[in-house]
Image: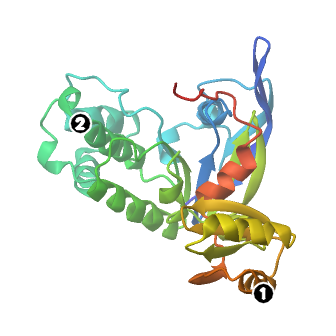
Amino acid sequence: MSDATIEVSGLRKRYGATAALDGMTFTAAPGRVTGFVGPNGAGKSTTMRIILGLHSADAGRALVGGRSYRSLRRPLRHLGALLDASALHPARTGRNHLLWLARSQGLGRPRVEEVLELVGLAAAARRPAGGYSLGMRQRLGLASALLADPPAIMLDEPFNGMDPEGIVWLRGFLRALAAQRRAVLVSSHLMGELQGMADHVVVVGRGRVIADTGVADLIAAASGDRVRVRTAAARPAADALAAAGAEVALADADVLTVRGLPAERIVAALTAAGLPFSELAPHRATLEEAYFDLTREAVEYRAGAAS
């Protein structure tokens, strides 16, 4: 398999007065699933479209296996991509959609049948794609991305429209592709899915990279020195711990997250105040928590509270 690395270096792009990309730089390496996450307007879609040669950058470069996508003679053999599952001819059957793509890449019908089976669409291959559900269109888009057996895969929100069975299948499928030494770059807003699937994560905001690290390392950093305390007297316990010098947050009706006091001092403070607790353990952050911590100042569009 040829070099699968997707390399983005110093990308800059402006639309009038708006800087969509401001030095975007990261690498999606072979053998791992790289999550590509950020708020709406962070520059994810623009970056992916530049990688595919659909937009031009004002500065910087985007390479697939060391070459620009536009320079590749048969690009689907190098990078398979799914950006918009609805970008297909609605009257064309699923099979004919793939046959049309296959001809452009010098591929025959056997490979089309193979990928239809691979993504679970063989039984629906004769139906017009316009009648497919969103989840089925996602599967057809994935089949298109895999058609030429490329060493790199890039997917934008591939879980959208998937039912629970489809989500579980896709999660395992993408991990299997990475295990074949492919580079898998996945943009998604579903942090729970990425936490159980991605090895690496690139967090972006306002057109630049905020964090580029392993998922486990990011979660460990977000967990920090916090301690989780479960107590039936959450409000009085929070007051007692704050008086002892801790930074306390109410995580749930009966759960506190405590920072700034070691476990033994938390126990001492609660015991001295005569307050009960049933659980005390190191806090383990989720990828979603880590993401919100990182992007709090990078959100471009923020909704108001419901009245």
Residue 4 shown left or right of residue 149 in the figure: right
> Are dots 1 and 2 in contact, CB under 8 Å?
no
The image quarter containing residue 251 is bottom right
Residue type, mark 1 in image: Ala
User: Which is nearer the eye, 281 or 16?
Assistant: 281
Classify mark 2: helix, strand or loop. loop
Residue occupied by mark 1: 268
Distance CA(mark 1)–CA(mark 2): 58 Å
The image quarter containing residue 19 is top right
Q: Which residue is depicted at the point 48% across and 52% down?
A: 150
User: Which is nearer the eye, 238 or 1?
Assistant: 238
Asked if residue 305 is positioned above or below residue 78 in the image, the reply reads above
The image quarter containing residue 137 is top left
Q: Position of residue 18 (x, y in %)?
A: 76, 18
Residue type, mark 2 in image: Ser
Asked if residue 179 is positioned above or below residue 45 in the image, the reply reads below
Q: Which residue is depicted at the point 22% across and 36% down?
A: 94
Disc ID at residue 133: 2
Q: Is residue 257 visible?
A: no
Q: Position of residue 195 (x, y in %)?
A: 54, 62
Q: Position of residue 175 (x, y in %)?
A: 47, 65
Q: Nearer the viewer, mark 1 or mark 2?
A: 1
Q: Residue furthest front?
A: 274
Q: Residues within 10 Å of mark 2 (few under 14, many from 20)?
A: few
